[in-house]
Structures are given as structure tokens and as C-alpha cells.
Amino acid sequence: MEEYYFLFLLAGVFTLFASVQDLKSREVANWLNFSFIAFALSYRAFYSYFSKDYMFFVFGLLGIGIFFLLANAFYYTKVFAGGDAKLLMGFGIILPFESYFSLALLSILFVLLLFTVGAVYSIIYSGFLAVKNSKGFRKEFLIKFKKDKKLFLVSLALIIVLLVESIISNFDIRLWGIFSLFLLLIPGLYIYLKALENSCLIRLVDPGKLTEGDWLEKDVFLHGRKISKSVHGLNMTEIKMLQKAKKKVWVRYGIPFVPVFFFSLIIMVFFLISLKLDPMNFFSYLS
């Protein structure tokens, strides 16, 4: 499994550069992601040729195939931006697949790890945004709370129903407490995220600062022509039209997600080394 050390190092270097780029400009250059994919596939191809272990290359192709499907699913549902999706494809090449079972297992585990780290990262990052834009955030939070406070009433009603059911069925009251907390957190989290989005992530942007792939918050009408908001974001032709008309537009930004790949890679490599680079030891590790 030592042959994967180079792939891990390669992913670390490219993901670090991509993270810096994402944090600075909120986009990742295509050449960076495509170079990562090309280098990783080339390494698998050369290693397979010289070691006569052709499955090493085949598993790389299968990995990028699976992650290509996942990346497109996340992209078209607006979970990922284009740069995130392309980076995910690259990670499909560097994971240490040794069998068809490990291909499925590691793919699932890595995606779960990615979203777990992503959830923690998003909460921390959004907290900084809320503090940085505290005045606007507080205003939006109060507006959303007054508008959607009925969600808390629904949660309270469900909590009461669960309490009655727990008493009648002799359920553990601790479980009722856990579910009650969860039911109260859902509307609170929804209001928090909507307030954060409206106060920090949706901005009126000068056309000169637009970049390819920016997501419009709403359709724009320009000299009788409609520029529709799209999952693909603005293209260069549309940006030039807006710049020529000096038209400011509302753009929806996301939280820079590429650093999550970097942190997830570090955690994954740490656990793989703990498992002696054999993902099949995962179950014995749990036991």
C-alpha cells in the first residue's frame, strides 16, 4: 500500500493550493483541478505498467467514474460548486482501492467523512461570518424569527405528543429529551441559516467584480433579454453583457468548501495509517 503515499502527497499539495485560491477568490482554477486529475491518473498508469499490477490503474478509473457520478449529483443539486465537484473527481483516483468491496466501502466512508467535516467547518465558518456582519445578521435573524416562529410551535406540539406517547408506552424519558432537543434545534437552525444567507451570502455585486460561475439570486432583464439564474452560474458572455450595461446584480455566494477536502484528507490518511493502510481493518478497528 506504500504506492499510495505519493497520491496522498499529491492530493495534499494540490488541495492546499486550491484551498488558498478558494478562500481568496471563491473559485478554483480549472487548470489546477485538471492537473491534479492528470497527474494522479498518470502516476497510476506508470506504476501499473512497471509493476505489472494493472488493477492499480483500473481501480483508479473506477474511482474517478464513481466520483464523477457523485460530483455531478452534488453539482446539479447545488451542494457543490464546479470547482468542488472537479476536486471530488480527483479524490476518486487517490483513494486506496484494493478490491471491489473496498471501492464501495472507501467511497461511502470518504463521502460521509467529507460531509461530517464539512458540517463542522460550515458551522465554525458561518459563526465568523455572523460575528463579522453582526448588525445585518441580527436584523435578518429577528425578521426570520418573527416570520417563522410558528415552526417552534409545531416543534413544541410534536414534543408534547412524544411526551404523552412516552408516558403511555413507558419509553425511556431520556430518549424523549434527545428527540425534543433535536426538534427544537431544527427550526432554530433553519432560521439561523436563512438569516446568515440573507445577511452575509447574498450581495449586490458590481459587474466588474463578477467571475464566471457566479450564481445569480434572481433573473436579470437586460435590454429585453433575460439572463436566467442557472446551476451553471454566469458565463463570460453574460458577464460581458452586464459589464457593458454597467448593471449590478444580486449574487448568491457559498461558503468556501475546498478547505474541507484538505482537512478530510488529513483525517483519512491518519486513520489509514492507524489501520496499517488496509481499509479492510476498519471493522476490526470499530470492534
Image (spheres, rainbow, N blue to C red):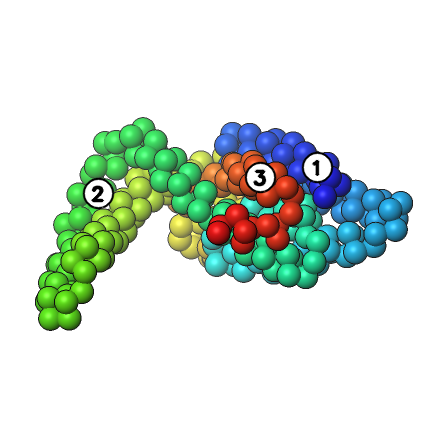
Residue identified by numbered label 2: 141
Q: Which of the two discs, 3 and 2, labels the residue nearer the N terminus?
A: 2
For residue 274, the mark is 3
Q: Amino acid at mark 3?
A: Ser
Residue 156, x across and y down, in percent? 13, 59
Residue 124, x across and y down, in percent? 36, 35
Residue 90, x across and y down, in percent? 66, 47
Q: Amino acid at mark 1?
A: Tyr
Cα–Cα gap, marks 2 and 1: 47 Å
Label 1 crowding class (10 Å Cα cut-off): few <14, some 14-19, many 20+? some
Cα–Cα gap, marks 1 and 3: 14 Å
In this rendering, does residue 287 appear at all? Answer: yes
Residue identified by numbered label 1: 5
Is the N terminus in the top left, top right, bottom left or bottom right quadrant?
Answer: top right
244 or 218: nearer the viewer: 218
Residue drawn at 85 percent across, 44 percent down: 46
210 or 163: nearer the viewer: 163
For residue 113, the mark is none
In this rendering, does residue 32 appear at all? Answer: no
42 or 148: nearer the viewer: 42
- In screen coordinates, is 131 left or right of 48? left
Q: Secondary structure at mark 1?
A: helix
Q: Which of the two discs, 2 and 1, labels the residue nearer the N terminus?
A: 1
Residue drawn at 54 percent across, 60 percent down: 73
Q: Quadrant of residue 151?
A: bottom left
Q: Secondary structure at mark 2?
A: helix
Q: Which of the two discs, 1 and 3, labels the residue nearer the N terminus?
A: 1
Residue drawn at 18 percent across, 60 percent down: 172
